[in-house]
């Protein structure tokens, strides 16, 4: 700027200092606007995360009154505990069922309703509805739906001539049943996101494909799936987070049982903290879950991130 | 697939063969929708049955009764739990809308030092789920003496990284001229935010409010660990208590669950657009 080049003259100093004044006023306003959110985030997300990490390296007396430094003791303990390892495996099993099932169920719904047709709004409402269903209500609805005496699932099973199954009380089924319930509860969420993704695909690509005589099947594999892949990738990441941290439906339906077969990771943290009162040990379990979450997210980026087709 | 008809085609005679071709599609979409909402329909059906009819193998209740609803509201005071959920969810939503607009505006439109760095840090917080921080947060809230109060249910959630992110992105996408005009008139940032940004962002704010309300209404783990007294518990915990208390009275449990579902369901049906765009924005951008 010419003015700043000749900044020796008093005449150019005046606008400069007023500009500084103006900038300071702007900073002040910006800080005032930003501070409520920043202070709240620092106290209720950043501070708990950091203090949780500190806590996990401490030891406490049985009354939880005094804490002292303990190094990796809590981590060594959880690595040697079969209950913790089995909670890890249960969570992994659960996630491996929920993620693909929820994605598939939601994708089917989205493929059925993303284009407008007579009645499409009505069907969209029905498919998107499960987003408005609280976890506790979903759990109760399924508890009744699977009831051995009255549930429709068991009527259906009986009609097929098969024996009635104790879906939620048999240790070999319960975690899978909870997985189906969780995937069902997420159908609306996934359908909304994938519908938005499908509507973002340019219509002229389909026009061109039709002119070339491509069938619906070919269009799906060559146009829909590749162009939807960024959305599928993101939705997959969100499902991963949601299923690794599932809690409400498990607390309400099985309380970790039968025979600890549904004792997922978050449930273990909850149990160790609020029933065994081992806060520092539970903090270590919580932080390990966080690390596992970040690791799995990173793995998803590594393996699917590159295959994702961006426009 | 039917596409939006061009005006030219509007006067064409009805093409019956085309409608016939659509029948399999309608069968498919209806069946799938029916299967998806069936668990909710059978829950609704159970909530309208007397004890005697509860296990009758019919889709509709043999005789309709509202007795389970009366029991859920009187012998079990579901009303006060619902009121708590309304209060806490509404205040959380109000708080998130206010803090997100202010911070989102500052990060999009105010020349601040380290602005992008602050924004990046806030986006990073999206990776920290509440199920990870709930234990240290509980200890923190306990040391503040907030356990079993509305403060514990509301204050930790009135700033949202997702809300700030969405508002920042939205306000950044608006044309600069709109803001320049106000600046030339000598308006400060608070006035520009109130008179220019907020009115322009009303649809984004509606979507954010719907998304936040839904999330707050559905909160389960946090009220479970921070509330003990019946006066403070929320509707989600009420359902859990109802299951333990009336486990064999499935019609009463079902009526209670339907009452807890009703507010979000009605809100969803009335403001579907806000909900859907809120979830789409929150998911795809978050």
Image (cartoon, helix red, strand yellow):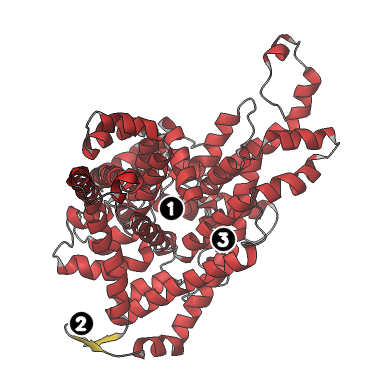
Q: Residue at image x 33%, y 54%?
A: B115
x then y, percent, for residue A157:
64, 55
Determine whether label 1 and label 2 are within 8 Å by CB.
no
x then y, percent, for residue A237:
53, 59
Q: CA distance from mark 1 to mark 2?
A: 36 Å
For this rendering, which residue is in front, A285 or A198? A198
The residue singled out by tag 1 in the image is A140
Query: Is disc 1 on the same chain as disc 3?
Result: yes
The residue singled out by tag 3 in the image is A98
Query: Is disc 2 on the same chain as disc 1?
Result: yes
Instruction: Check the residue under mark 1 and report the chain it is in.
Output: A
Q: Residue at image x 47%, y 38%?
A: B277
Left or right: B231 with respect to B273? Answer: left
For this rendering, which residue is in front, A92 or A192? A192
The residue singled out by tag 2 in the image is A64
Left or right: A216 with respect to A12? Answer: right
Dot placed on the residue nearer the N-terminal end, 3 or 2:
2
Q: Secondary structure at mark 1?
A: helix
Q: CA distance from mark 3 to mark 2?
A: 37 Å
The single residue placed furthest to the left in the displayed view is B145
**Residue A230 seen in this snapshot:** yes
Q: Residue at image x 40%, y 53%?
A: A136
Dot placed on the residue nearer the N-terminal end, 3 or 1:
3
**B63 is higher (above) or lower (below) than A274:** above
**B22 is higher (above) or lower (below) than B211:** above
x then y, percent, for residue B88:
24, 47
Q: Secondary structure at mark 2?
A: loop
């Amino acid at each position: 700027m010419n003015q700043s080049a000749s900044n020796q003259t008093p005449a150019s100093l005046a606008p400069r200092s007023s500009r500084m004044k103006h900038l300071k006023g702007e900073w002040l306003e910006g800080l005032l606007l930003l501070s409520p959110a920043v202070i709240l985030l620092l106290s209720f997300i950043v501070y708990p995360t950091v203090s949780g990490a500190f806590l996990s390296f401490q030891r406490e007396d049985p009354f939880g009154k005094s804490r002292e430094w303990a190094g990796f003791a809590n981590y060594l303990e959880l690595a040697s505990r079969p209950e913790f390892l089995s909670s890890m495996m249960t969570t992994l099993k659960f996630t491996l069922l929920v993620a693909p099932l929820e994605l598939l169920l939601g994708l089917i719904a989205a493929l059925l309703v993303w284009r407008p047709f007579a009645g499409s709004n009505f069907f969209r409402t029905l498919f998107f509805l499960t987003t408005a269903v609280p976890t506790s209500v979903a759990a109760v609805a399924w508890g009744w739906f699977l009831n051995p005496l009255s549930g429709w699932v068991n009527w259906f099973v009986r009609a097929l001539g098969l024996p009635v199954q104790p879906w939620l009380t048999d240790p070999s089924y319960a975690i899978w049943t909870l997985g189906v319930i969780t995937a069902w509860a997420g159908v609306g969420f996934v359908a909304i996101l994938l519908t938005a993704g499908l509507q973002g695909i340019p219509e002229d690509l389909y026009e061109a494909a039709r002119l070339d005589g491509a069938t619906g099947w070919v269009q799906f594999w060559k146009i829909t799936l590749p162009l939807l892949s960024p959305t599928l990738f993101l939705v997959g990441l969100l499902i991963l987070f949601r299923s690794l941290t599932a809690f409400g439906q498990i607390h309400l339906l099985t309380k970790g049982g039968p025979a600890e077969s549904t004792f997922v990771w978050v449930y273990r943290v909850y149990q160790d903290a609020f029933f065994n009162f081992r806060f520092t040990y539970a903090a270590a379990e919580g932080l390990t879950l966080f690390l596992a979450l970040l690791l799995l997210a990173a793995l998803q980026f590594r393996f699917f991130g590159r295959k994702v087709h961006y426009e | 697939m039917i596409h939006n008809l061009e005006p030219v085609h509007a006067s064409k005679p009805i093409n019956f063969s085309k409608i016939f071709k659509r029948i399999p599609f309608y069968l498919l979409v209806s069946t799938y929708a029916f299967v998806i909402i069936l668990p909710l329909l059978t829950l609704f059906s159970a909530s309208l049955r007397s004890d005697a009819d509860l296990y009758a193998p019919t889709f509709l209740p043999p005789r309709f009764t509202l007795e389970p609803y009366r029991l859920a509201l009187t012998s079990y005071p579901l009303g006060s739990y619902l009121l708590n959920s309304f209060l806490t969810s509404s205040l959380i939503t109000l708080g998130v809308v206010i803090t997100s607009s202010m911070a989102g505006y500052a990060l999009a439109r105010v020349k601040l030092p380290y602005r992008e760095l602050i924004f990046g840090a806030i986006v990073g917080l999206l990776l920290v789920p509440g199920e990870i921080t709930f234990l240290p947060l509980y200890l923190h809230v306990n040391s503040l003496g907030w356990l079993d109060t509305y403060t514990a249910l509301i204050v930790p959630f009135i700033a949202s990284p997702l809300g700030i992110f969405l508002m920042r992105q939205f306000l950044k996408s608006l044309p600069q001229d709109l803001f320049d005009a106000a600046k030339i008139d000598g308006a400060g940032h608070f006035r520009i935010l109130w008179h220019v940004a907020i009115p322009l962002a009303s649809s984004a704010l509606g979507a954010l409010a719907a998304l936040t309300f839904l999330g707050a209404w559905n909160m389960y783990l946090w009220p479970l660990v921070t509330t003990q007294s019946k006066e403070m518990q929320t509707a989600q915990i009420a359902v859990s208590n109802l299951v333990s208390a009336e486990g064999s009275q499935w019609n009463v449990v079902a009526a209670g669950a339907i009452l807890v579902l009703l507010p979000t369901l009605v809100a969803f049906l009335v403001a579907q657009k806000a909900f859907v765009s809120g979830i789409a924005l929150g998911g795809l951008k978050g």
